[in-house]
Amino acid sequence: MVDITGRVRSVWRRNWDAFLRTYQVNFIPPFIEPVLYLLALGFGLGTYIEAVDGIPYPVFIAPALVSISVMYSSFFECTYSSFVRMYYQKTFDAIIATPVSIDEVIAGEMLWGATRGMIYAALMLPVLLLFGVVAMPSSLLLIPFAYLAGLLFAGIAMCFTAITPSIDALNYPSFLFITPMFLFSGTFFPLDLLPQPIQYFALAALPLTHVVGINRAITLSTFTPVNLFSLAWIAVATIFFFVLAIRLMRRRLIV
Amino acid sequence: MKIIQCISPKTGGTLEVLGMDVETHQRQIKSRLGVVPQETNLDPDFSAYRNLLVYSRYFGIPKPEAEKRAKDLLAFMQLEEKRDVLIDKLSGGMKRRLIIARALVNEPELLILDEPTIGLDPQARHLIWEKLRSLQAEGNTLVLTTHYLDEAERLCDRLVIMDHGKILVEGAPADLIREHAGNDVVEVERTEKVVARLDELGVNYDLAGDMLQVFTDRPNDVARELLETCRHEAAVTVRPATLEDVFLRLTGRSLRE
């Protein structure tokens, strides 16, 4: 189905090396972002909100901030950044002239996108701990789960990258898919405030809903059977988009 | 070219590279091939040296060995001073040299070059030719496509001229020139008197813009005749025939789009 060997590591390493070379810029956002959101929304706007379902507002949004950051970093890595490597830098062309296959190039890109999401989650965790908005030790699970969630968003992103005619057209999924998810996935207010049909839509079609649900269970250390459903949803979707992305990319790149 | 490199699927027929089928042995073939693409696709995120190291990793070459080869190749391509310079800061000629160095990291048995000196100034071209010839001298096999016929004449032991996907001729450059253009070419301005005289002499000539080119086995006689009759109105020169003459005679002068 897909032709992947250990050589996928060399593609992943290429991106890791490039990431480290510019680490100063890459490591700052995950520290700054949660501070800004927590100050503005959690402690600013949050003063007017006593509690959500009995949870202090900053504590309620903390897992959402991690989820959003994972989504953004993985999604944008495998849309704009991958597109630049593929289309402008011709990096993919250079790699497939070696024994590395196209499937491995695309898989390596997605695994890297997931890694980036995980790195961001890991860097945010100490900041959230400092604010006292996440429970320990369960919150350590944020990090491995960020890899799985990151892989899901990377796979979806890579499907868009495979079919986009130009880098500008990538703005469509960003505005029409990512932004609605940012707002309507139980991030800043509970999902059940929305009309029922929208709730079902969010559960069926907005992956971030499931990611936020699981991350919130992790940071509050309160797990429910619904989380298992979310985990299964994410696992199936991740495999589906991972394979689909490779198929679509083959169609684009093998000419 | 892309089918040889196992990048594009073949459209028909059979093709073996290094004795292996391109459809079933892609990885094995690619691991023994060096490719110099026409388009510069060096990795702009890394320096010259890191480019070679990162590329070695795609071949699974162990790091110490890769470092040694990268150093040697930078020296071979006269890029040692640019070792830690990012790709954007290299000149066109340096980029081409680095791409050739990159194509050599896996010590390929076959080096494929697609227009290796396109868009380069004369100095840069000569340096690359020199390096390619020294690779040839070491016994490496090079497959090269080029639109520069002087390049083909200098570098190729065996040459194939293709037009619209069909092979027109093949052979050693010198043989092809002798066979299809003769030793020397007489070039003369195109005037009525010249045309009349050439028709009288019964020699064949080709139109090349406002010049006439005479391909003949007795160029000096023709030139003397023309000088005697048309000296005052037309400049006459005799020059050695080149591959370009062969190419133009075989493929015609109309623009190929």
Image (cartoon, grey):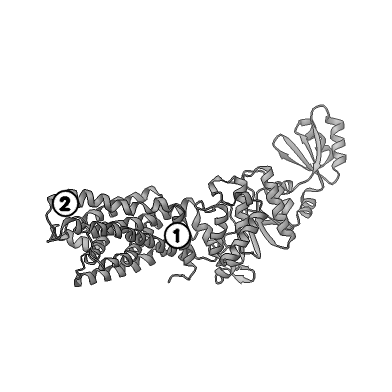
Q: Nearer the viewer, residue B24 or B219?
A: B24
Tell me: A150 left or right of B124: left
Quarter of the image that includes the N terminus of chain A: bottom left
> Residue A83: percent from the left, percent from the top?
42, 53
- Chain ID of residue with mark 2: A
Indicate left or right for A81 with A219 as reference.
right
* Chain containing the residue with disc 1: A
Name the residue that disc number 1 marks: A16
Using residue A20 as the reference point, say whether residue A139 is left or right of it.
Answer: left
Residue A46, labelled with which disc? 2
* Element assignment for label 1: helix
Quadrant in the rendering for residue A238: bottom left
Which quadrant of the view contains residue B61? bottom right
A255 over A231 or under it: above or below: above
Q: Amino acid at mark 2?
A: Gly
- Residue at the image point whose x is 41% and y is 51% from the top: A24
Asked whether residue A221 is in view, the answer is: yes
Q: Secondary structure at mark 2?
A: helix
Q: Please tell me the numbered disc located at residue A185.
A: none
| Cα separation between marks 2 and 1 | 38 Å
Q: Nearer the viewer, residue B198 or B58?
A: B58
Tell me the kind of residue under disc 1. Answer: Trp
One can see residue B115 in this view: no
In the displayed structure, would residue A153 be above or below residue B27?
Answer: above
- Mark 2 or 1, nearer chain start: 1
